[in-house]
Image (cartoon, helix red, strand yellow):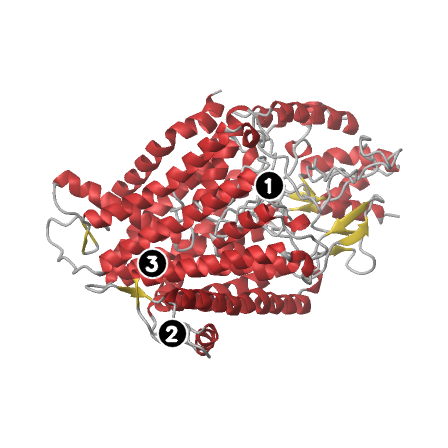
């Protein structure tokens, strides 16, 4: 079988698997978010935590829950990393430095999983599984919780209540993330991903040299790393490492896992708002952007477009594993940058200017196609609100979306949401380039060096976490700046989403009339796609022109 | 118990307690349960697919190794490593901690991260092509792409079948074996795409060299 046919079949299998999951998982999540009964386990959790499961919260109370939980998580993880040397299973690793601990804590709590460290030489097993991996679960659950509140904003009327954060968080962990992770962790071990508590194991190699082979509870962490769109690798090489991703099958499973929740949430959305077609319209936009991106990155890599090193080598294999090749690497790269996952199975830094530039552009879209767990859907719904508003301006009537009026108050929250991330990306990257010290951290020179910095800030602000890894980011400047950018890029938008949720929940629904813009037709799919591309394109074009575009045209 | 009146403090205490409960559940119970099942049902794979499966392991099937000649001055970290013609050679690797242990160091998984138009990378690729061509006695144009590029992990155990066949003649000559026998050994180690269409064809260098070493 030739490469092209095999590549297409791989994409087809992935799409088929996602399509088959779409209804059952989307419906399951809808039940999790609306069910009125608490399971026995959940009641035990509520009692141990001392929270009441039956109180419906207003949006400020819900928000305070989100922020309190995230603050406590950040401090707890920071402390955990600082005292690692005193803990069991630390493999002799020292305490993590203050700036790196702050960066890592901010990174894992915000679902970013940017890593300024190399796992195999910095983190012991206990910190990995009971510190970092726990945040893989709960940060993903926080994202879905905030989405749940927004969806209730659309479905409820004349109430200030948007749900109970503690219940949402607990249920998503217990009924969704934990069971799925468990099943797929076992599948991954069966395919060769390691799962043990050994340290390094010394062997005398075939040629008579020495090699230290690492151990670790990798599979359990790998499953939730992808499922929760976290992306923080157990090892430095992330999903390029043979112990994290040993075969082309585990590779496809990992791509499936990092997409599956975000892809199924539009179904949940359709079910909850009582019109499944609304969900189909949203997933159509996501699928369009994803498919276009897969095509562009794969084509650039296959033809070594604008790459002298690629032409000298006879192909874009630098930074890619032999068992994956271009098709499986490009598919992973696109999926991981369009979700907020950020796991990588190849070195994005060594991609063609077009392919690597596309991964940056993917993140700049705001992680919406399909985006992170929860955050992807609330991100695209904000853009849908803007699209409806733009259409309303064209015909001169008060815009409505899903029976709710979009007035000045709603549009202010939506606009603030959309401004936050670009502002942090561009100010962060701009400041960094202004100082000689941070500039020196670039491995590559010229436009490609700037792309490394732009990638870092786009990745942090959009809570992606992947990198053009040539950048030496373990410095006080980058650890602090990127840590702050991740926190702002995660929590400020959440404030606006919850405020919008409260505002929508308080409204009476408006009846649908002949003048209402239908938001489930291909026409709206086109409008929303256009709004997304124009908003992002205009915002980031100057920065992209200095980086990947300049390099590609050179 | 004394009642806490500040709602803000109460909320943070609830958050802390919930975090601790969820840590026990997802950070302790979950990985232990997965490990328990993994060690019972798939002990070989859970422990890194050691080679050979029984006895003293010399490798993991999944982690590539270097196959170089012994260094002339073992203490000198700057001595250039020379490939051993008796072994099939893996891809170039950037997993080098710089401590003299050489590449394919699993304590330092790494890609080169050099850009697509990096002048140094382009020069390195050209130099590798000439070096491999001279080493394997083939024309430079026929050296396959995986022979001149470093992988994403620096621990890639695989090479393309083309690169393996290219090396067969040189390995046979260095070991005094019949070239046809070595090519036959390579043919037996070519792994097709998974399910016929996932990933790429490959030859696992560690397994191939292990089989080579066990030949009488």
Instruction: Evaluate if marks 3 and 2 touch, with contact meaning CB atoms under 8 Å apart.
Output: no
User: Are discs 1 and 3 less than 8 Å apart at CB?
Assistant: no
Sequence order check: which comes first, mark 2 or mark 1? 2
User: As rendered, which of A53 and A155 lies closer to the eye?
Assistant: A53
Vertical arrangement, residue B79 with respect to residue B6, above or below: above
Residue A304 image point, x, y percent: 53, 28
| Furthest residue in direction left, as rendered | A514
Disc 1 crowd rating (10 Å Cα; few below 14, some 14-19, many 20+) is: some
Residue drawn at the location 38% of the way across and 30% of the way down:
A541
Residue A114 horizontal/vertical position (percent): 53, 46
- Quadrant location, the N terminus of chain A: top right
- Residue A52 — which label? 2
Q: Residue furthest top?
A: A554
CA neighbours of label 3 inside 10 A, class few (<14), some (14 to 19), many (20+)? many
Q: Quadrant of residue A69?
A: bottom left
User: Which chain contains the residue that carries disc 3?
Assistant: A
Which quadrant would residue B181 be assigned to in this image?
top right
Q: Which mark is residue A474?
A: 1
Label 2 neighbourhood size at 10 Å, few (<14), some (14-19), many (20+)? few
- Image point (49%, 20%), residue name: A554
What chain does mark 1 sit on? A
Residue A523 found in image quarter: top left
- Badge 3 and badge 2 both on one subunit: yes
Label whose residue precedes the other's in the sequence (3 or 2): 2
Q: Which mark is residue A454?
A: none
* Real-space Cα separation, disc 2 to disc 1, in angstroms: 42 Å
Vertical placement of residue A554 versus A210, above or below: above
Q: Nearer the viewer, residue B209 or B118?
A: B118
Query: Where does label 3 land, which residue?
Result: A267
One can see residue A9 in this view: no
């Amino acid at each position: 079988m030739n490469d092209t046919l095999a590549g297409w079949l791989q994409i087809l299998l992935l799409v088929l698997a996602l399509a088959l999951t779409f209804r059952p998982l989307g419906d399951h999540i809808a039940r999790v978010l609306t069910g009125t009964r608490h399971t026995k386990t959940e009641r035990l959790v509520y009692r141990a935590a001392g929270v009441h499961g039956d109180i419906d919260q207003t949006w400020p109370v819900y928000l305070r829950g989100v922020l309190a939980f995230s603050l406590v998580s950040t401090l707890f993880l920071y402390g955990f990393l600082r005292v690692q040397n005193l803990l069991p299973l630390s493999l002799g690793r020292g305490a993590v430095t203050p700036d790196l601990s702050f960066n890592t804590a901010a990174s894992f709590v915000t679902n970013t999983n940017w890593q300024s460290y190399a796992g195999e030489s910095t983190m012991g097993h206990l910190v990995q599984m009971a510190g970092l991996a726990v945040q893989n679960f709960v940060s993903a659950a926080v994202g879905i919780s905030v989405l749940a509140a927004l969806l209730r904003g659309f479905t409820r009327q004349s109430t200030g209540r948007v749900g109970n954060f503690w219940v949402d968080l607990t249920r998503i962990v217990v009924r969704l993330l934990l069971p799925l992770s468990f099943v797929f962790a076992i599948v991954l071990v069966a395919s060769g991903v390691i799962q043990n508590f050994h340290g390094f194991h010394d062997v005398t190699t075939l040629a008579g040299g020495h090699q230290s082979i690492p151990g670790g509870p990798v599979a359990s962490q790998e499953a939730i790393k992808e499922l929760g769109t976290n992306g923080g690798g157990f090892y430095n090489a992330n999903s390029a490492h043979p112990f994290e991703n040993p075969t082309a099958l585990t590779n496809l499973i990992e791509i499936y896992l990092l997409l599956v929740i975000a892809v199924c949430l539009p179904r949940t959305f359709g079910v909850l708002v009582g019109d499944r077609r609304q969900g189909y319209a949203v997933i159509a936009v996501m699928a369009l952007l994803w498919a276009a991106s897969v095509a562009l990155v794969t084509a650039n890599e296959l033809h070594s477009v604008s790459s002298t090193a690629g032409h000298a080598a006879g192909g874009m294999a630098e930074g890619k594993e032999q068992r994956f090749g271009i098709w499986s690497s490009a598919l992973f790269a696109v999926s991981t940058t369009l979700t907020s996952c950020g796991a990588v199975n190849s070195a994005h830094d060594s991609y063609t200017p077009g392919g690597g530039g596309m991964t940056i552009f993917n993140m700049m879209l705001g992680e919406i196609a399909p985006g992170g767990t929860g955050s992807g859907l609330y991100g695209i719904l904000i853009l849908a609100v803007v699209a409806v508003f733009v259409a309303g301006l064209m015909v001169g009537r008060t815009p409505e979306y899903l029976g709710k009026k979009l007035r000045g108050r709603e549009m202010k929250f939506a606009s603030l949401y959309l401004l936050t991330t670009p502002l942090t990306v561009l100010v962060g990257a701009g400041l960094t380039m202004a100082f000689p010290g941070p500039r020196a951290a670039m491995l590559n020179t010229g436009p490609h060096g700037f792309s490394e910095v732009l990638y870092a800030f786009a990745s942090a602000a959009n809570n992606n976490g992947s990198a053009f890894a040539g950048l030496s980011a373990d410095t006080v400047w980058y650890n602090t700046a990127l840590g702050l950018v991740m926190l702002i890029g995660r929590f400020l938008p959440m404030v606006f989403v919850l405020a919008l949720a409260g505002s929508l929940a308080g409204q009476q629904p408006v009846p649908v009339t002949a003048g209402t813009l239908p938001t489930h037709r291909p026409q709206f799919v086109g409008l929303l796609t256009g709004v997304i591309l124009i908003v992002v394109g205009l915002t980031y074009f100057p920065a992209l022109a200095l980086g990947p575009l300049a390099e590609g045209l050179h | 118990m004394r009642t806490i009146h500040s709602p803000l403090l109460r909320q943070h205490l609830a958050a802390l307690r919930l975090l601790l409960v969820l840590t026990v559940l997802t950070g302790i119970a979950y990985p232990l349960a997965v490990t328990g099942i993994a060690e019972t049902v798939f002990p070989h794979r859970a422990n890194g697919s050691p080679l050979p499966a029984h006895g003293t392991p010399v490798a993991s099937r999944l982690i590539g190794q270097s196959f170089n000649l012994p260094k002339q001055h073992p203490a000198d970290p700057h001595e250039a490593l020379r490939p051993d013609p008796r072994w099939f050679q893996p891809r170039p690797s950037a997993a080098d901690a710089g401590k003299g242990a050489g590449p394919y160091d699993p304590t330092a998984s790494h890609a080169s991260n050099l850009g697509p138009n990096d002048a140094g990378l382009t020069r390195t690729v050209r130099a590798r092509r000439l070096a491999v061509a001279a080493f394997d006695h083939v024309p430079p144009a026929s050296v396959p792409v995986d022979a001149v590029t470093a992988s994403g992990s620096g621990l890639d155990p695989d090479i393309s079948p083309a690169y393996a066949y290219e090396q067969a003649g040189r390995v046979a000559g260095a070991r005094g074996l019949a070239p046809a026998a070595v090519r036959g050994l390579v043919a037996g180690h070519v792994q097709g795409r998974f399910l016929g269409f996932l990933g790429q064809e490959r030859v696992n260098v560690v397994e191939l060299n292990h089989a080579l070493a066990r030949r009488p």
